[in-house]
Amino acid sequence: MTLDLPSFSPADTLVAVMVAVSASDQNMRTAELIAIQRIVDHTPVFANYDTDRIRGVSQTVISLFEEEDGIDALFGLVRDSLPERLYETAYVLACDVAASDGQVSEGEAALLQEIRDQLEISRLHAAAIELAAQVRHRRL
């Protein structure tokens, strides 16, 4: 079965990346969902975003994960819909969601690696982003 992918705005695509990271370990934790909502509510890139779109974007990502080549389709959608200047933004948001519950699962780590590779995030920039996310979500 081939999925008919919707047209995504750049903001939709950023939401899709965050949802993908949360869903990558088959366990979308409450902390991750709250983090996604907080990011959408408070990050300038989402200033004019219609938050009612989050549910549809999430459903598309979940449907893609059920497909054999869904991850490839997701990255095709990301490359088609997201300007290159927002690639690092997507990675920052993905790392924040992964770190939001205080731990990065194997599935999340694998997807973050794939995002780095697919979006050609430099290793130095990725390391700085990952450390910042880890430190930002540290608990007492």
Image (cartoon, rainbow, N blue to C red):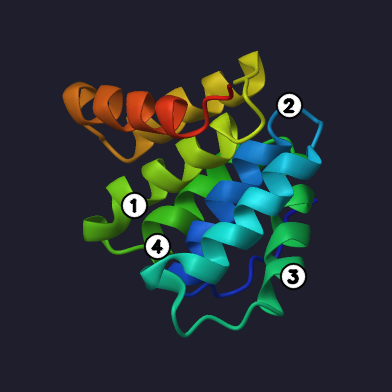
Element at label 2: loop
Among all residues in the image, which is located at the extreme top?
A: 106
Residue in the image at 65% along x and 21% along y: 107
The answer to whether marks 2 and 1 mark residues whose Cβ atoms lie closer than 8 Å is: no
Q: Classify mark 4: residues with Cα within 10 Å, few (<14), some (14-19) or many (20+).
A: some
Residue at image point 54% right, 20% down: 110
Q: How many numbered marks appear?
A: 4
Is residue 110 shown left or right of residue 80? right
Residue 18 in the image, given as x and y percentages of width and height: 57, 48
Q: Which mark is residue 25?
A: 2
Q: Nearer the viewer, residue 134 or 28?
A: 134
- For marks 2 and 1, give the CA distance: 22 Å
Which residue occupies 73% across, 54% down? 2
Asked whether the residues under the numbered discs 2 and 3 touch, taking CB atoms below 8 Å apart as contact, a structural biologist would say: no
Residue that label 1 marks = 89
Amino acid of disc 2: Asp
Q: Which badge, 4 or 2, comes first in the chain's sequence? A: 2
How far apart in space, not on screen, are marks 4 and 1 (Cα)? 16 Å
Q: Which residue is mark 4?
A: 80
